[in-house]
Amino acid sequence: MSKKTKRVFVPGCSLPSYNPEAVKKTLEYLQKKLPGTGAILKCCGKPTKALGQLDKFHERYDQFQAEVDKLGADEIIVACQSCFLTMTENSPNQKVISLWELLPKIGLPEESVGIGKNSDIVFAIHDSCPTRNRATIHEGIRWIINELGYKYEEPPHTRETTRCCGFGGMVVPANPDLALRVMKRRTSEMESDYVVAYCAACRESMVKGGKKAVHILDLIFGGPWNSKSEFPGVPGSPIKAWANRYKSKKNINKVLG
Amino acid sequence: MDKVTYPKKALDKMQEIVNDCMGDAPPYCEATCPMHTDVKGYVNLIADGKHKEAVNVIREKLFIPRVLGRICAHPCEEQCKREKEFRQPMSIAALKRFAADHYDDEKDWDLKIEPENGKTVAVIGAGPAGAQAALDLRRKGYKVTIYERLPVVGGMMRVGIPEYRLPRHIIDHEYSLLNKIGVEFKMGVEVGKDISFDEIKDKHDAVVIAVGAHKGVVIPIPGHDLDGVLDAVNFLREVSLTRKYDIGKKIAVIGGGNVAIDVARSARRVGAEEVHLVCLESKPEMPAHDWEIEEAEEEGVILHDGFGPEQIIGKDGKVAGFQIKKCTSVFDKDGKFNPQYDENIKETLEVDNVIFAVGQAVDNSFVPEGKLETVRGGRFKADPTTLQTKIEKVFIAGDASGRSVIAIEAMAEGRKAAISVDRYLKGQDMFADRQYEGTYETWLETELKEDVVDLPRIETSKVKPEERIKNFDEVDLGFTEEQAVKEASRCLACECKLCMKECEMLNDYCECPKELFESILKTGEIDPIIPYSCNMCSQCTLVCPKEFEMKDRFMDIRKQMIKANGGKSPIKGHKAIEMHQALGFSKLFNTAKPAKYGYNEADVKEKGRS
């Protein structure tokens, strides 16, 4: 058997800054189910692009692409919807696949299946807006939640009509009051007090909008979650986020070391 | 940051939005109203119980709201979305009447005028066209004199439209605004007789001819010159001024329009017991409004639709009968008026009078022959855009030009003439930016929302037919407050602005995308916080009927701002992002690991769930 790196798992930025354990467990699971999976922890450069710094973005993306090419991967597995779009657009030689499309194909870890079936809470699903047109991602998320056994609700704006969480476009540091209004508007249309998102930035926005919110990987690799559970909040400072990011790097190195 | 410049492609894309965004498109009713009354505005204020505010909105455009609330032919209602979708248009005129009848207070009338400019304008005719022209010109500081042949103001609204539809004190009350702001009236002065047209022309800096069409038309069929043959204009004028007319017990009216209905119903009130209404068209094709026909029939008017005149039968030089014949078609294949008859079907009505209500002409005899060009029906020829005649200082407004048919159109013509007079006397361009005067077609396109229900139009209550034919009291009693609020609440408030309902940030910075991008194209400038407040979520595009990609436009702007700002974002808070990105690409937080083979599966199980 060749020892090639067929694919790489790219957790992105927000997830590693939020939950290093989830990064680790996801990578371990992918390793097990899909031997030949490497990993890259690096930004895709989307924030640079969003600011309008096109030249800098291309310079940065090239750095990322060089890492992919060095590993020789044909496939990129992403856990972030911005990564999904950025890489789909800029890595024509790789097949970019969302983790949420992949999991229905490879299944969930055995011990996760049905974990939420006795939960007393209903999760409102918050779809990420960059992939509003990628129905297979929406399907995958719902498949995962069903498989876990949790109940869920669809907000009035969902799937392809989903509303922005308030984080997009680098608006938070530019116009924080506006961003908060967008966050609150999004959460105000959800009936349930609990939200599941599949982007760590979206999740944080849902919390700022007044909800108890988890990342879908929290459901897969944690729980069971119920009304008694303590839900993750928002990071107290950027230092905490960078510490998590560093932990994620260590975790990746450990898993693939 | 340096001055931001945009590549042509980016500018073109912004221009597309400016061209086609419907955010500023007026609703169908407002565009259709020749005076562009903010119908949606006042109707929704009534729905909210803010009746006084509704009157203020109406008065921004109309100085005779109580009059128009009664007699406006409301072309707006024909274009109402509820008419198009359900044949149940908003009862716009009746709502206007409700608000104005109960909440208009002359103490609040706007009496402001610009400083006197020393120039004088003569307006001939105190009908809706003349009065509007006079009002607008007076407000601009002109000294305006209205010359009116009749002893009363209002023109055809006064001596054409019957009193039971429009009580006269209402006209006088609303016209008193003109006196309050200093328009001078010369009542009972007939130009061409009491004062020559030339004298008026020479004494003033400009003249607006708004004499209306007060000459009756009689079709020269056999017997038309018999005693007892009348025309609608003279009949209605006489009835309006005296509430009397020496008329027979049995009469026939010929004509299928609203004027014919007015004649028939007025005849009932001055003593005619048997009124026949004869018209070429079949009932559904009659030009008169359905409800007018219905009200006439309620009052006992006998309709002979689909019949034309053959001859008036005389006895001793007086009318004794009216022979009519079946009309098989009114218009020919080319749409030209060319009635065809079945000569085998004829009827004779035994009547004492035949009244022609088949159109009006302009009495232009007061202008010395040849001084002004005239066209069909004696109407004065004027430039359609400016209403100016070949005598530069003379303008034509209202029915006298043949360009208006109803009061609100006449008012719009009066306003147009006033704009022209003002420009002429100031030496300004007479033709610039005049495309939105009078009725125009809006560029709005709206779809019914899914939750819209077909709610029926609420009708006003009316005096019982047997009571109302006894006198000239007003027939229509208008809305109660409860009815008005309920009716107003049916308004669909037509507008586009779908993106504005989706996007938080656009609402912070503009009324609609068109306004925003128009200002960028005009000034080349935009506060950086605006493009940097877009979440890039595409929610606007999703609902935009034109599918404009607003986020891409904001991205175009961001790119240029970065260029103009030495590669950095002009937003202070973005230093954090730039730091975040530098770290995100630093070795400290990066790793790239190849796949690991021979991985110990037991590890996964052991560490399993936590």
Image (cartoon, grey):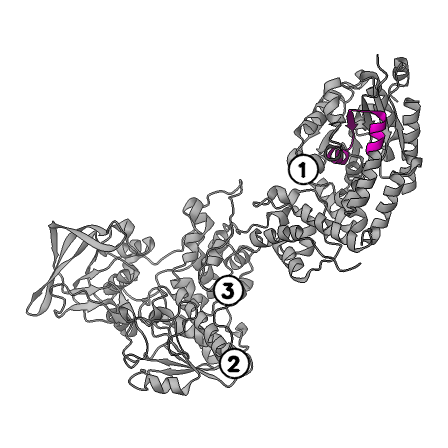
Q: Is residue B306 left or right of residue B371?
A: left
Q: Residue shown at 81%/48% (left/top)?
A: A173
Q: Is residue A191 magenta?
A: no
In the rendered image, residues at marks 3 and 1 fall on the same chain:
no
Q: Is-magenta flag for residue A79?
A: yes
The numbered mark, 3 or 2, whose residue comes first in the sequence reads: 3
Asked where in the image residue A213 lies, by quadrant, the reply is top right
Callout 1 environment at 10 Å: few (<14), some (14 to 19), or many (20+)? many
The picture quadrant where one finds residue B583 is top right
From the viewer's perspective, is the residue at label 3 or at label 2 nearer? 2
Q: Secondary structure at mark 1?
A: loop
Q: Amino acid at mark 1?
A: Thr
Kind of element beneath mark 3: helix
Q: Is residue B250 left or right of residue A44?
A: left
Asked whether A107 or A211 is in front, the reply is A107
| Residue where numbered disc 1 is placed | A162
Residue annotated with mark 2: B141
